[in-house]
Amino acid sequence: MPQWIQWVLIVAGLLVIALLGRFIWQRSHLMQQQNRQQARNLAFQNERREQMIESVRVLAMSIEQDQVEYSEACLRIKGLLDHLAPDLLNQSPFRIFQEMHDALQHMPTHQARQDTATRFIDKMDRQRFELEQKHADAIRRAATAIRYHTFTEQAR
């Protein structure tokens, strides 16, 4: 084999090695970035989950100390449990949060409430207060139970 072909093959081999080295370095760098991003996302999700758990506990304590309307607290707790542990909404005593949500979901909130006639709002408020009184014991029991509930990490 002529010497110039040997040199061409050596140079081609070195070029291929250099290109493969660069490709491997880029891939490993990309994987490191992805791993760091994944770790940041997981940390954010865990922090957010802990914040939601703390919010549930604060709402439960507010119910126990009569610092919040039961209906509002039930709606908020139900919304948080939808993200934290939706299966709890089908279990006793936590089922009351879902039941209150179902009974109240047709009532307007925020801007829709402001845009609704006062007579209609008064009627709905009476219904809401009746529901709160009817289920007060169940709501308080559920609040105490959820306050001390141990939330386990959900499967991802």
Image (cartoon, rainbow, N blue to C red):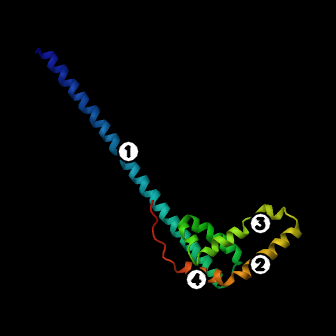
The three-letter amino acid code for the residue at tag 3 is: Met
In-front residue for pair 98/43: 98
* Numbered disc 1: secondary structure: helix
Which residue matches tag 2?
129
Side (left or right) of 18 relative to 72: left
In primary-sequence order, the first of circles 1 and 2 is 1
The three-letter amino acid code for the residue at tag 2 is: Phe
* Mark 4 burial class by Cα count in 10 Å: few <14, some 14-19, many 20+: some
Within the image, what quadrant is residue 155 found in? bottom left
Distance CA(mark 4)–CA(mark 3): 26 Å
Residue at point 70%, 73% (across, down)? 72
Q: Which mark is residue 30?
A: 1
Which residue matches tag 4?
144
Side (left or right) of 147 relative to 72: left
Distance CA(mark 4)–CA(mark 2): 21 Å
Residue at point 45%, 57% (across, down)? 40
The three-letter amino acid code for the residue at tag 1 is: Leu
In primary-sequence order, the first of circles 4 and 3 is 3
Distance CA(mark 3)–CA(mark 2): 13 Å
In-front residue for pair 5/65: 65
In primary-sequence order, the first of circles 1 and 4 is 1
In primary-sequence order, the first of circles 3 and 2 is 3
In primary-sequence order, the first of circles 4 and 2 is 2
The three-letter amino acid code for the residue at tag 4 is: Thr
Which residue matches tag 3?
107
In primary-sequence order, the first of circles 3 and 1 is 1
Whole-percent x, y for residue 32 in the image: 36, 49
Question: Is there CB contact under 8 Å for labels 4 and 3?
Answer: no
